[in-house]
Each structure stands twice: as structure tokens, then as C-alpha cells.
Amino acid sequence: MKAGLLALALAAAASVAHAQGDSLTVFQDPNCGCCAGWVDHMRDSGFDVKAIKTTQMAAIKQKLGVPAELASCHTAVIEGSGQVVEGHVPATAVRKLLAAPTVNGVAAPGMPLNAPGMGQLDGNLITLDFHGRPFSRD
């Protein structure tokens, strides 16, 4: 009986941890339409996304440590880990980020046409870590 309860408790804890990893808050400019496309991509990929429209994007990026040279139009924070996702990063790269807890953040700088919310992934989108090193190719 005790072993069964322990297994149930561990399964519940793992479920909560998984849910936090799949939840993120995205900050976006209220005048930007492509951000909604990225949010849809993340939701379609199984993420729980809370979208907050704000005109304070520069301050948010600075507070979250987004390097200016890697900036894009929206910024997301993964609940639980605090990792940052800058711009039109594909869901596959976000899952890779979740598996790399020592990486603070990743970015798809600017507004690449081959990124979710902008256009079709073509296998040539390079996502960078916050040190400017290649992190993922999608």
C-alpha cells in the first residue's frame, strides 16, 4: 500500500513538473500580428501559453537579460525554469532548451521568414543561445 501511494505521489509530482515545463508566458507588443502566429504554433505543439500584450517590451527584454543583438518582437519565459525564449523560436528548439537547464535562453533574432509565425520552417532556421552560439537548426 505504501509503495503504491509513493508511486502515485511521484507520478503526480512528475506531472506537475512536466506541466510547468510546458507552460510559458509571452510578452508581445499589442501592434504586432506575427506574435499571435508564434503563440498558435506553441499551443499547437502542446504548450500552455499565457499571452500578455504590453508596450514595455524594451524594459522586459532588459529585465530578462535578452542580448540586444538577438532581439525580436516578443519574449517568453518558461514557467518553472525561468528560461527565456526570444522571438520566433520553434517548439522543437524550446523542448531542447527545457532539456538543457544550464542554457539561460535562446533566440531567433529579428523576424526570420522561415520561422513559426512568420512562414514555413525549412530546416535552415538557426536558433542561437544568449551567447550567440548556434543552439538548434530547424
Image: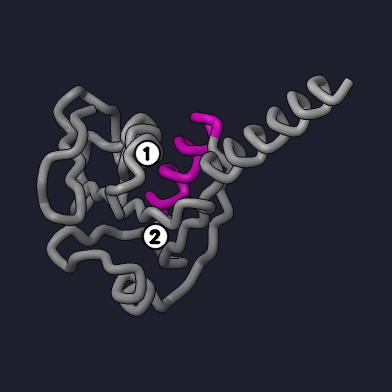
Q: Position of residue 123 (x, y in %)?
A: 19, 23
* Vertical relation: 85 (above or below) 91: below
* Residue range (magenta): 32-46
Question: Predominant secondary structure in magenta?
Answer: helix
Q: Position of residue 97 (x, y in %)?
A: 34, 40
Dot 1 corresponds to which residue?
94
| Residue type indicated by callout 2 | Cys
**Residue at point 20%, 55% (across, down):** 130
Whether the magenta-drawn stretch holds residue 73 is answered as: no
How far, Cα to Cα, is label 1 from label 2?
21 Å
**Residue at point 27%, 37% (across, down):** 115
Number of other residues with Cα within 10 Å of mark 1, as a class: few under 14, some 14 to 19, many 20 or more? many
Q: Position of residue 7 (x, y in %)?
A: 74, 24
Position of the N terminus, as image quadrant, is top right
Q: Determine which quarter of the picture holds residue 96.
A: top left
Dot 2 corresponds to which residue?
32
Q: Position of residue 113 (x, y in %)?
A: 21, 39
Number of other residues with Cα within 10 Å of mark 2, as a class: few under 14, some 14 to 19, many 20 or more? few
